[in-house]
Amino acid sequence: GENVEQHPSTLSVQEGDSAVIKCTYSDSASNYFPWYKQELGKGPQLIIDIRSNVGEKKDQRIAVTLNKTAKHFSLHITETQPEDSAVYFCAASEAGNMLTFGGGTRLMVKP
Amino acid sequence: ETGVTQSPTHLIKTRGQQVTLRCSSQSGHNTVSWYQQALGQGPQFIFQYYREEENGRGNFPPRFSGLQFPNYSSELNVNALELDDSALYLCASSRNPRDPGRNTGELFFGEGSRLTVL
């Protein structure tokens, strides 16, 4: 089955700096790669996703890149703000909605 | 706000007991997935229901079972509870990617049911 590795597990940045979270996956059949943000006491919320026919996708301060050959994808957050502080999860799936999640990255943005 | 509601939000059980968790899916969604999230870890896929049938299952024993109803709501049942079953149980609704029409396969999660087994 699919295995998703995510790093770093914790990331501390100064407000205004950029943050990068990286994930690798094992199943070459995976074709859908979402990123979720989970705040304390809440369920994961989809923030951006990318499909295997696209190499990069951007939505305001958030961007995701995908390298299918190397089987890795990354989340980039620019101009970080304190409200970006949360746990971020990457995930991968072949079937579109049976997701395998990474272990999570706790992002702390210091004002 | 995803429109996915789960109940109860918190509950405490003892080893050996049984628990039922409930989920109402977002309007227009016909697929419900359940995930288990242990403290400090990523969610793990338990199973998925589509058209009232199990449509995929992760690496969980048979004492984890589920139901989907005609209105697409769903239940997760866990029998013979063990201490390691303590976790946040997340329900996610979506449209099935194989359904015709515009469908991105995105999952929308509820806030979860936090189960503590003593």
Image: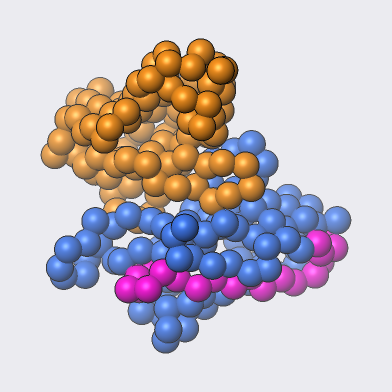
> Residue drawn 59% across and 72% down?
B22
x and y percentages locating residue A90 in the rendered image: 41, 36
Judge from the rendering whether residue A11 lies leftward or rightward of residue B97; answer left or right. right
**Who is closer to the viewer here, A22 or B108?**
B108
The image quadrant that residue B13 belongs to is: bottom right
> Residue drawn 53% across and 21% down?
A109
Q: Is residue B24 magenta?
A: yes
Residue B115 shows in this picture: yes
- The image's colour scheme reads by chain
**Does residue B18 lie above or below A47 as drawn?**
below
Query: Farthest residue in the front direction?
Result: A111
**Does residue B40 lie above or below A77 as drawn?**
below
> Residue drawn 56% across and 23% down?
A108
> Residue drawn 17% across and 63% down?
B102
Q: Which quarter of the rendering shows the C terminus of chain B?
A: bottom right
**Does residue B56 lie above or below A12 as drawn?**
below
Judge from the rendering whether residue A34 lies leftward or rightward of residue A42; answer left or right. left
x and y percentages locating residue B106 in the rendered image: 32, 55
- The hue in which chain B appears in the rendered picture of the protein: blue
x and y percentages locating residue B4 in the rendered image: 48, 65
Q: Is residue A52 magenta?
A: no
**Does residue A111 lie above or below B116 as drawn?**
above
Q: How many marks?
A: 0
Query: Farthest residue in the bottom direction?
Result: B70
**Who is closer to the viewer here, A42 or B53?**
A42
Residue range in magenta is B12-31
Residue A29 shows in this picture: no
**Who is closer to the viewer here, A104 or A85?**
A85
x and y percentages locating residue A64 in the rendered image: 28, 30
Question: Which chain is rendered orange in the image?
Answer: A
